[in-house]
Image (spheres, grey):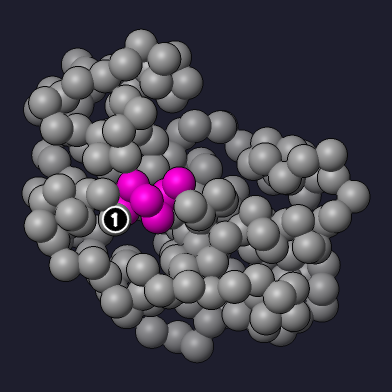
Amino acid sequence: MTTDTWVAIDFETATSARVSACSLGVAVIEDGELATTASWLMRPPGNRYDQRNIAVHGITPAQTLLAPSYAELYGEIEPFLAGGRVLAHSASFDISVLRALHDHYRLPVPNAEYACSVAMARRAFPHLANHKLPTVCRHCGIELHHHDAASDAVACARIALNCREAVGAMSVTDAIGELGVRVLRL
């Protein structure tokens, strides 16, 4: 791992249950650059969906009926998370989904730290009306297809990079420290 590697994540869920992840996007920042992106559709338990969630992200049961579960995909996902640093916009939601999935499928929780890009944006751009993903993306000139997990993860990574620039930090890690944002363990 390089010295300033962060993996931005975004989950979309099929219902209000945290364990109902139906999509995951990741965007890797390595030494100040967006380096890699990946995304997966996954079958939530029972492949059950609420119409309200479908209306938000557009993913349907037909799209995930034959998709692998999170547990079946974890071999591909784990290298992004293990021993690393994770970012999420409104991290409390995405981290709670991650923990629920690991609990449900009895997978070990990755040995990783995480930080919230909302907290970064609040401190770097305090003048914004709110710090929701679309608002911060508009402010920073970041293209966004909101509620597409891949696009949301890339946006989260780009927000972290914009916050780094806003405070003149050398790295995302330094920016998090300068902004006084807490780094927690998964």
Residue 114 located left or right of residue 160:
left
- Residue 172 in view here: no
User: Residue at horizontal 39%, vertical 21%?
Assistant: 53
Residue 164 vertical position relative to residue 87 in the rendered view, above or below = below
User: Residue at horizontal 82%, vertical 67%?
Assistant: 166
Label 1 packing within 10 angstroms: few (<14), some (14-19), many (20+)? some
Most extreme residue toward the bottom is 3
Measured from the top left, where is residue 27 in percent x and y? 46, 57
Q: Which residues are magenta?
A: 93-98
Quadrant containing the C terminus in the rendered view = bottom left
Main SS of residues in magenta: helix
Residue 52 located left or right of residue 75:
right
Q: Is residue 178 magenta?
A: no
Measured from the top left, where is residue 63 in percent x and y? 23, 22
Measured from the top left, where is residue 81 in percent x and y? 32, 67
Q: Between residues 87 and 149, which one lies in front from this camera angle?
A: 87
Residue 173 in which image quadrant? bottom right
Measured from the top left, where is residue 51 in percent x and y? 36, 11
Residue 117 located left or right of residue 185:
right
Q: Between residues 125 and 180, which one lies in front from this camera angle?
A: 180
Residue 120 in which image quadrant? bottom right
Q: Which residue is label 1 attached to?
A: 99
